Amino acid sequence: MKIGILTSGGDCPGLNAVIRGAVLNGIKTHNVEFVGFLDGWRGVVDGDVIDLPRTRVRGISKQGGTILGTSRTNPFEGPNGGPENIRKTLERLGIDAVIAIGGEGTLAAAQRLTDAGLKIVGVPKTVDNDLDATDFTFGFDTAVQIATEAIDRLRTTGESHHRCMVAEVMGRHVGWIALHSGMASGAHAILIPEKPVSLDQIAQWVTEARDRGRAPLVVVAEGFVTTDMEAPHSERGLDSFGRPRLGGIGELLAPEIEARTGIETRATVLGHIQRGGVPTAFDRVLATRLGMAAVDSVMDGLWGTMVSLHGTDIVRVGFEKALDNLKTVPEHRYDEAAILFG
Ligand SMILES: Nc1ncnc2c1ncn2[C@@H]1O[C@H](COP(=O)(O)OP(=O)(O)O)[C@@H](O)[C@H]1O
Ligand SMILES: O=P(O)(O)OC[C@H]1O[C@](O)(COP(=O)(O)O)[C@@H](O)[C@@H]1O
Ligand SMILES: [Mg+2]
């Protein structure tokens, strides 16, 4: 048996650990061969693969990024796209099954291809931690760790200058990274997409913190909107899948906070730093287990399912469960964090 693996959509730390986990379990337990598709669905559509012998995955679980490359190619587009062409390409390459590692876009594509009869198993990937039907995704813990370290640094310079510091973190639709890094770093306000807040409320939290002698710290997710905004702030056009590129809400908030509070305010965007570099031990273990479990799912013929973390167990769930809803920050988690604001 030969399994093809791909990594697709935005990268995040832990992708290589998934690949290694899959290859080692496949070779040691099931005696299967592996190839890797280069650059996500692009490699599937073009039949662009590399062999993945055990030597190729040696020591990679601590490496950030993905040794296979990634892209936002739509597998249904182009002269070689679509299920029939892909089926022929897989047959030509002698590939029996595919493991697709990706987020909601990748899994939506995988679901459509599985519905058309292709043999695909998924591994959930999102640094934002917004996929439903899995408790955590690998990469999230690393992003929170990186963000927390960066915010701790902003804190000391903010304190020296008696400034308000605004740290902007990732989070297109959900505020998990902001919630966790904000709570870990003792933020005086955490602003997330799920909970629009007025500028006056933000200014009040900032003023309260200053009045207690603190240098106010605000953590904001890129997808946050104030109660006066209709859509998340976007100033850099669209990405290759046609979605607005977010980022810049921190710079928008800083002068508003300064005007309302009289406190000198600076904004910092953490950006892709949150997605780069070595994964934490937690993410390496989670990613390795998911990769191993994905191969077991292939051996069991569980097409159209993904492996997922449920408590401390790795379980199997249908793609539709993951795609039905976004995993947003629940009200009670926000309310709990808000006790610490101001
Ligand atoms: N409904 C869909 N049908 C087919 N392909 C899709 C669909 N949604 C997204 N894709 C493709 O899935 C890939 C990854 O999507 P994207 O949302 O960028 O990343 P992620 O998998 O991280 O969510 C892209 O190649 C995109 O073209
Ligand atoms: O710059 P890129 O690659 O378009 O990605 C930016 C986007 O990716 C995200 O990090 C989400 O990625 P995930 O698919 O891993 O959740 C968003 O927070 C951000 O808007
Ligand atoms: Mg996505």
Image (cartoon, rainbow, N blue to C red):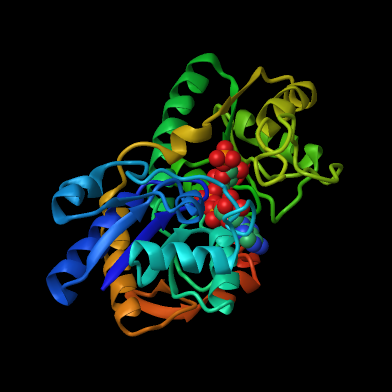
| Residue 222 percent coordinates (x, y) | 64, 40
Report the image quarter containing ligand 1: bottom right
Q: Determine the image quadrant of residue 23.
A: bottom left
| Residue 320 percent coordinates (x, y) | 59, 77
Q: Determine the image quadrant of residue 24.
A: bottom left
| Residue 25 percent coordinates (x, y) | 19, 68
Q: Determine the image quadrant of residue 189.
A: top right
> Split into 4 quadrants, where in the image is the N terminus?
bottom left
Give the vertical position of 245 relative to 110 (above or below): above
**Which of the two residues, 325 or 34, is positioned nearer the viewer here?**
34
Q: Residue at x 29, y 77 (%)?
A: 296
What count of labels does the image hold? 0
In the image: residue 32, left or right of residue 262: left
- Residue 186 visible in image: yes
Give the vertical position of 21 relative to 15 (above or below): below
| Residue 121 percent coordinates (x, y) | 42, 72
Farthest residue toward the top? 161
Q: Residue at x 37, y 42 (%)?
A: 65
**Which of the two residues, 39 or 187, is positioned nearer the viewer here?**
39
Q: Residue at x 28, y 54 (%)?
A: 17
> Split into 4 quadrants, where in the image is the C terminus?
top right
**Which of the two residues, 120 or 131, is positioned nearer the viewer here?**
120
Give the vertical position of 124 relative to 173 (above or below): below
In the image: residue 201, left or right of residue 165: right
Give the vertical position of 116 relative to 89 (above or below): below
- Residue 337 visible in image: no
**Which of the two residues, 279 or 67, is positioned nearer the viewer here?**
67
In the image: residue 25, left or right of residue 166: left
